[in-house]
Image (cartoon, helix red, strand yellow):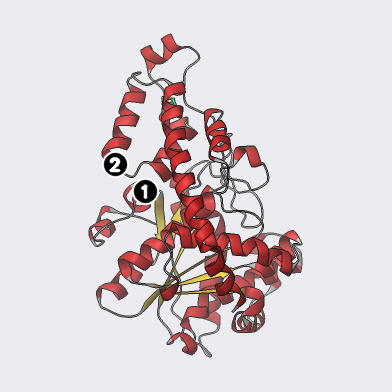
Amino acid sequence: MEENIIDPFGTSIITDYSKLFTQLGLQPITEDILRRIKNPSRYLRRRIDFAHQDFDKFLASFEEGRPIAVISGIKPTNEFHLGSKVTAEKIIYFQKEFEAKVFYCIADLESLVDNQIPLNEAEKIAIGNVADILALGLDPKNAYIYRQSEEKRVTNLAYLFSRRITLSHMKNLYGERHLGLYFAAFTQAGDILLPQLEDFDGPKNVLVPIGLDQSPHIFLCRDIVERVKDVFHFFPPSAIYHKFFRALDGETKMSKRDPMSVLFLNDEPELAKRKIINCVDGGRKTVKEQRRLGGEPEKCVNYELALFHFVEDDNKLKKIYEECKAGKRLCGECKEEIADIVAEFLKKHQKKREKMMDMARKLLQK
Ligand code: SF4
């Protein structure tokens, strides 16, 4: 079996999630942790958020009424897709349930250095991205949304941090890369630690809800905290890691590069439906076989759409799973059912997004 590959700047492939606990030193999300949370999100309940670092410390800060914050961001290279929606919904959840202040970074310096997107182009894309997250429910009154290129405190931190880390350390974490990507990683560390500056009321526990492919940034950031402790009294960042939502063609990582294998939140609902009807499923070769053996929801992207995104009710999800396994469901009608839910979601989301465009412009151009 192929080894797990984690690459924040390329393609990550996870063949065995269970190995990651020892491979990366992550902690599992346990029942004990969930019992401490009043309304666990569907990502937590369903163990899509499956691993963490110091999430228990973040919870302790919250329980003891100490300050907390949550940070995430987006690299403005394209429209929001379902992968971006996962991270966005996670920070919105912590804003609502934990009243945590949200820091949302538009990583335009990273899109410049990694994807060669000029800053003015990135800004146009970012306005749409911010409208998306507002439409998903982010409250801008308890959020700081910024572009890296405009936030001097982040780049200043990146310069300071780069002085404390050696090239071999970066090669160990990221492999051999051009220096721009290493500097993008220092800039991300600046983003993650920004909420702990005195301008934002000083050190505190900050949670980073993040995809597993981005875990090297958390490791780097935690190493930096240790190495700058003579200057800053930062808390090491906490993180919760989610599993990958597969592309519609079944590939492990949702790629922004093949439009037909990705559902974008601005897709025409009819196009989105067509994409779902054509997605990889866990059906058998014939109807007769499916009735006899049942389907394989574990292999099915349509089921993953329900699990990650579009069926909130756990009982309804369980019913889909059990009917599939028992051969009571056939893939054609099952995909139609999910496709209709997705189309309805997209129609509503796109209306809300349109209304949020002015606010998004104002937030980014202030
Ligand atoms: Fe997937 Fe539905 Fe087919 Fe089962 S019946 S494999 S859940 S599409």
Q: Is residue 114 visible?
A: yes
Q: Is residue 22 visible?
A: no
Residue sitting at 59 percent across and 52 percent down? Answer: 6
The percent position of residue 16, horizontal first and vertical second, equals: 49, 42
Report whether 8 appears left or right of 328: right
The residue at the point 46 percent across, 28 percent down is: 335
**Residue position for label 2:** 314
Q: Residues within 10 Å of mark 2 (few under 14, many from 20)?
A: few
**Toward the viewer: 83 or 118?**
118
Give the image location of residue 70, x and y in percent: 43, 70
Which residue is denoted by mark 1 in the rendering?
A: 47
Which amino acid type is shown beneath numbered disc 1?
Arg
Quadrant in the rendering for residue 25:
bottom left
The mark nearer the N terminus, 2 or 1, is 1
Q: Quadrant of ligand 1?
A: top left
Asked if residue 191 is positioned above or below residue 153 in the image, the reply reads above
Q: Residue at x 57, y 60 (%)?
A: 129
Image x and y of residue 350, in percent: 51, 51
Q: Nearer the viewer, residue 251 or 125?
A: 125
What residue is drawn where x is 59% and y is 69%? 361
The reply to whether callout 2 and callout 1 are in contact (CB within 8 Å) is no
Left or right: 232, with 2 as reference point: left
Which is nearer the eye, 132 or 295?
132
Say what amino acid the circle numbered 2 marks: Asp
Based on the displayed image, in which of its 4 quarters is residue 322 positioned? top left
Question: Element type at marker 1?
Answer: loop
**In this rendering, is residue 292 above or below 339?**
above
